[in-house]
Image (spheres, rainbow, N blue to C red):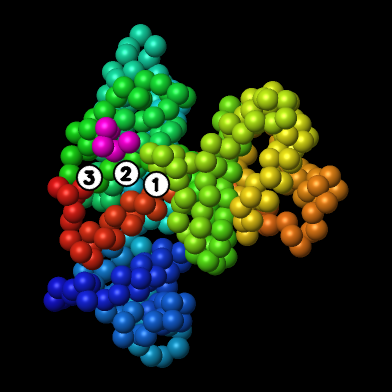
Amino acid sequence: MNNISLKSIKYESIKAIINAISEADRISRAEISEKTDLSLVTVGKIADALLERNVVTQIKEVRSQAGRRAGLLSINPERFALILDFTRYQFRCAILNLRLETLEKFNFEYRSSSSFEENVQAFLAETIANVRRSYNLELNCIGVGVAVPGPYDAVADRVLTSRVPELADLPLGEIVRRAFRRLPVVIDSHINAAARSNIRHVEAFEEKNIVYWYVSDHYVCGVYVVNGNLILGKNGHACDLGSVRQLTGCTVEKKIAECKDQDEVSNILALSLYNLIQALHPHAIILDFCFPFDCDGIIPHLNDALQMQYGMKAEDIPELRRAWCKSHNSHRGLTMSLCELWLNAIVYGPSENFD
């Protein structure tokens, strides 16, 4: 097969075709053409280039009727992203395929007798050993995503956080890149990554204003998204919604931490949610809850409170939704970012992140 250049093809067309293949178990060129509104010729050219680069695989389907066999395309099942999670002291590793499905997970037992950096180094060594038992790390890993509990300053190579304060004194990017040589590394706040994952489930998200709101018994934070772009503050930090003070002078985050059940959470959130809607007028609000108790009744309670307590009309209330994937949304979001880097490298050639 002759090497097919992708640089002359519209980037968005390549991206649309990869997305169509990723979302299906197996899909024909004709089905991709119909789904993406691209010509069959364009689909065929891009599909051949992706096959050549081992991004997708092809099988032959034998039709029950007489006629030629159609080639069905599937995303290469051997490709994967490696996600490292430093959002708490029990470090975690996850392996996700390009369909954003979690293949395996590993937890690291933090050693109190060792320093934080020694634990990080031990975790990385343990992760590499675990991954290599079942996967070809060098050949099939598209990159390493790192979830951290606060904004990451790439210039200083520091994580600005008080939740795992040792990260603020550690050159995390340098350490991870040294362990995973020649693999691209993406480091981002788990809130930002989770927002990127969740907004994709909102229809026509690239044309809407969306709020992603993470609420747990120890952390309240959010991201405002306009036309698919995350609106971030200083150092790429998400909106610190938990620091908003109520009339009592207590922060929302502190009040939420005292809640014992979903009714108490709903009562605390209702006023903050009303103010958020008045200020930002979002089309949708995605609420991601992480509590040791059931949260299924919070959304209905909030809808009722907005109408009965704050006088909002039902048609003026934005869509309120739970997060689609209830655990590790940040892992999916980081995998999506790595896929973007990977696609850029396929189309335009390796960047310095791939050296």
Q: Is residue 12 left or right of residue 244?
A: left
Up-down: is 61 above or below 151? below
Q: Which of 14 and 271 is in front in this view?
A: 271
Mark found first going from the N terminus, 3 or 1: 3
Dot 2 or dot 1, earlier in sequence: 2
- Residue 166, position as x, y percentages in the image: 37, 20
From mark 2 to mark 1, how far is it between C-alphas?
7 Å
Count of labels in the image: 3
Question: Is 310 situated left or right of 126 in this image?
Answer: right
Q: Is residue 155 magenta?
A: yes
Q: Is mark 1 on a helix, strand or loop?
A: helix
Within 10 Å of the Cα at label 3, are there few (<14), some (14-19), or many (20+) other Cα atoms?
some
Q: Which residue position holds label 3?
A: 183
Q: Amino acid under label 3?
A: Leu
What span is in magenta? 153-157
> Which numbered dot is residue 186?
2
Along the viewing direction, whichever of 329 and 68 lies nearer the viewer: 329
Q: How far from the left and from the top, in percent, is residue 265? A: 72, 34
Task: Mark 3 vs mark 2: give the one in front.
Answer: 2
Q: Do residues under tags 3 and 2 come within 8 Å of each other at their CB atoms?
A: no
Residue 304 percent coordinates (x, y)? 82, 48
Say above or below: 287 vs 260. Answer: below
Name the residue rendered at 31%, 30% in the picture: 158
| Main secondary-structure element of the magenta-colored stretch | loop
Q: What residue type is labelled 1?
A: Leu
- Mark 2: few/some/many CA within 10 Å (<14, 14-19, 20+): many
Q: Name the residue under label 1.
A: 334
The residue at the far top in this view is: 113
The residue located at (40%, 36%) in the rendering is 151
Q: Quadrant for the N terminus, please.
A: bottom left
Q: Residue at x 44, y 81 (%)?
A: 37
